């Protein structure tokens, strides 16, 4: 399981397992993954995408993010006209929950898309969606 911790600019990864009563519980320590940006929504990169890791022991994630949280807050309050957008790709080792690879897929000052909140990969395409804008960006999701 991977969750976003936006203000601390990191992801938290943990293993979960079924409990006797049918619920779920953490089955080990929480592993923080410093991403260096205000992480928001997390999507699993499909195994069929060129961007996906080629190992069954690696979880590939696409994450929409806010590289400047104070500017995002000002944008949300309508005090400024735009906020930067950021999409990152994170490969996580499923055994250790440590990051193997972290890289930027998309970064902008917000003129083309303000305040990205989600990044999703479909085949060789990257879809970046905003918090408030009325459009999305469709880009190439390079595997380089």
Image: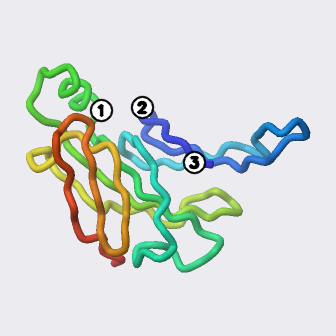
Q: Looking at the picture, does residue 132 appear above or below residue 94?
A: above
Q: Earlier in the sequence, mark 3 or mark 2?
A: 3
Q: Secondary structure at mark 2?
A: loop
Q: Looking at the picture, does residue 135 appear above or below residue 83?
A: below
Q: Nearer the viewer, mark 3 or mark 2?
A: 3
Instruction: Tell me: 34 left or right of 135.
Output: right
Instruction: Tell me: 69 left or right of 11.
Output: left
Which residue corresponds to mark 1? Answer: 69
Which residue corresponds to mark 3? Answer: 2
Counting other residues with Cα less than 10 Å from the Cα at mark 3, is it few (<14), some (14-19), or many (20 or more)? some
Cα separation, mark 1 vs mark 3, equals 21 Å
- The residue under the point 66% across, 62% down is 94
Do callouts 1 and 2 mark residues in contact (Cβ within 8 Å)?
yes
Q: Secondary structure at mark 1?
A: helix
- The residue under the point 65% across, 71% down is 57
Q: Percent from the top left, x then y, of residue 93?
A: 62, 64
- The residue under the point 34% across, 54% down is 119
Instruction: Tell me: 114 left or right of 61.
Output: left
Cα separation, mark 1 vs mark 2, equals 7 Å
- The residue under the point 57% across, 43% down is 12
Q: Looking at the picture, does residue 143 appear above or below residue 26?
A: below
Counting other residues with Cα less than 10 Å from the Cα at mark 1, is it few (<14), some (14-19), or many (20 or more)? some
Instruction: Tell me: 93 left or right of 107.
Output: right
Report the residue that reaches farthest toward the right: 20
Counting other residues with Cα less than 10 Å from the Cα at mark 2, is it few (<14), some (14-19), or many (20 or more)? few
Query: Which image quarter: residue 7?
Result: top left
Q: Earlier in the sequence, mark 1 or mark 2?
A: 2
In which quadrant is the C terminus drawn? bottom left
Which residue corresponds to mark 2? Answer: 7
Q: Percent from the top left, x then y, of residue 132?
A: 21, 34
């Amino acid at each position: 399981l991977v969750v976003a911790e936006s203000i601390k600019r990191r992801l938290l990864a943990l293993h979960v397992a079924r409990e006797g009563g049918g619920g779920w519980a953490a089955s080990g320590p929480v592993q923080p993954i410093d991403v260096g940006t205000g992480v928001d929504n997390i999507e699993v990169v499909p195994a069929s995408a060129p961007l996906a890791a080629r190992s069954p022991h690696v979880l590939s994630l696409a994450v929409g993010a806010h590289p400047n949280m104070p500017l995002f807050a000002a944008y949300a309050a309508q005090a400024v006209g735009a906020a930067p957008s950021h999409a990152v790709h994170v490969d996580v080792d499923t055994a250790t929950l440590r990051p193997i690879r972290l890289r930027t897929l998309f970064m902008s000052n917000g003129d083309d898309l303000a305040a990205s909140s989600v990044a999703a990969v479909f085949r060789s395409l990257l879809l970046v969606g905003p918090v408030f804008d009325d459009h999305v960006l469709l880009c190439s999701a390079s595997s380089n």
